[in-house]
Image: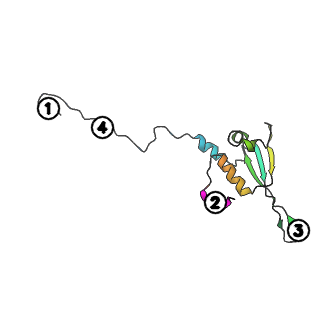
Amino acid sequence: ILDDNGTLAVIVSIKRDTTAPFVPNNPMSGLITSMFLDEETADVCFEVSTADVHDVDDGDEEAPSPVTFHAHRLILKTCAPMLASLFGSDDEEIVKVSINDVKPAIFRHLLHYVYGGSVEEGELNTHAK
């Protein structure tokens, strides 16, 4: 735009995209979460069962068979040192740890939380004491 004095006015506008983040999301959280229960890369194996005994059809009592959960030393040492203390040193082989006083569903929630997952409020209320 030229005015009477010969001055040119330039109008500049900058469009900001408010939907695009300035810093991209860090993929690490998703990578750790994707390793949850990954048997192929796991170096720790938890065998979890309750101490509950139930009746079998023939009248005998039987303890429920354990449920196996695979995990990773590094993640447990970093995020759950109390669980990591159950398997001791840094051996090269897969370590098996038996836990006999926790419901497998509860242990799964705990392990999922350690790997960056969340536990829904309904699940917390269901299993709260």
Q: Quadrant of the C terminus?
A: bottom right
Q: Amino acid at mark 2?
A: Asn
Sooner in the amino-acid sequence: mark 4 or mark 1: 1
Front residue of 72 and 87:
87
The magenta-colored residue range is 120-129
Label 2 or label 1, whichever lies nearer to me, is: 2
What residue sits right under mark 4 in the picture?
A: 13
Q: Main secondary structure of the magenta part?
A: helix
What separation in Å lies between label 2 and label 3 (alpha carbons)? 34 Å
Residues at discs 2 and 3 in contact (Cβ within 8 Å): no
Label 1 secondary element: loop
Where does the N terminus fall, quadrant-wise?
top left
Q: Is residue 75 left or right of residue 11?
A: right
Determine whether, in the image, residue 41 is placed left or right of residue 117.
Answer: right
Which residue is most to the front? Answer: 129
Q: CA distance from mark 2 to mark 1?
A: 72 Å
Q: Which residue is mark 2?
A: 125
- The residue tagged with tag 4: helix, strand or loop? loop
Q: Percent x, y for residue 121?
A: 60, 57
Q: In the rendered image, which residue does mark 1 sit on?
A: 3
Q: Check disc 3 and give the amino acid type.
A: Asp
